[in-house]
Amino acid sequence: MGFLKWATSPWGQTVPIHIAWFLIWVAVIVGLVFLIVHAAYMLLFGKEKEFAQGATANVSALPNRIPRHSLAARLFHWVMAAAMFTLLYTAFMPRIGTRFPWVTYHWIAGTVLAVSIVFHIVHATFYMDFWSIWPDWTDLVDGARRVLRFFGKPVPPPRKFAKYPLENKLFHGVVMLCGLSVIVTGVLMMSRIRTIFFPRNPYLYSDMTWGLMYVLHGLAGVGLISLVMMHVYFGIRPEKWAITKSMILGWMSRDFYLKEHDPKRWNVEGKG
Ligand code: HEM
């Protein structure tokens, strides 16, 4: 059982041509196992989160609705989500039985994803708090404390979160790697098919390079199946609903902010 599909090039060289499609099912099963184990754990052993007593916020200076995502950031998120679902559907449904002319829908959705990500990079670099999504030292120390407490070790509770909890930051990092992989390879792969952007040129790279590119595109693509499943699962969990709602409405309640966020690490005083 190989993880890749191979073929012989016109020059007699054995080259990979893409991933073996059973990996689609592996990714679906990984996603399902993750969410079943997590849901069962939360149901049987889940407790209220405990945080260390940290800085106290000046509650009177806080707005009732804590602004979390600007309109531009929310529009980006939902456009990207629509492109992502279209890409997953058009890429994998034809492999598991539903036949339709998927390539055109796929590269159009791919273009939407690529453009939305370029927008996001510029927006995040120049207009948002760029560093808020990268783990900092406090996240790492608190992450280690949470793991040790899980195993019953007597360590102090973690501090409250900055704007994003460590899990969200790590998820963003992994999705970014998979997303950039499908985008860079996908844009290059567009020269193998007919699109409105550049003339078709399947001889741009050697058969081996094309093969490896299709493999990377496929691996990152199936990785995104599990990642998207986990993301949607957390989005609909009741204790995360305040966060999901903020991606729709743009704000979260002051109570939720005070419960989970450290005003020193994510200062929103005076921001209405
Ligand atoms: C969620 C993201 C994506 C997934 C899951 C995905 C998945 C796939 C899969 C499984 C294939 C078939 C590859 C093969 O036969 O080995 C494919 C082909 C392709 N994808 Fe994607 N892709 C994604 C994003 C993109 C993006 C962002 C672009 C363009 C910017 C793109 C452009 C293409 C092109 C041009 C092909 C080649 C079609 C062909 O050679 O017939 N894809 N994609």
Image: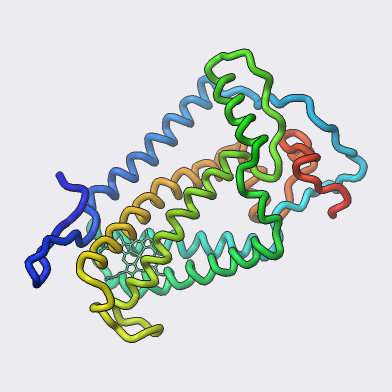
Most distant residue in the right direction? 60
- Residue at 61 percent across and 22 percent down: it is 47
Q: Quadrant of ligand 1?
A: bottom left
The part of the image, by quadrant, that contains residue 120 is: bottom right
- The image shows a total of numbered marks equal to 0
Quadrant containing the N terminus is: top left
- Residue at 27 percent across and 48 percent down: it is 23
Residue 12, image x, y percentages: 7, 66
- Whether 97 is drawn above or below 166: the answer is below
Residue 251, image x, y percentages: 73, 51
The part of the image, by quadrant, that contains residue 191 is: bottom left
Residue 201 vs residue 261: left or right?
A: left
Residue 90, image x, y percentages: 34, 64
Residue 257 vs residue 5: left or right?
A: right
- Whether 224 is drawn above or below 14: the answer is above
64 or 34, which is in the foreground?
34
Residue 104 vs residue 137: left or right?
A: left
Residue 160, image x, y percentages: 71, 33
The part of the image, by quadrant, that contains residue 258 is: top right
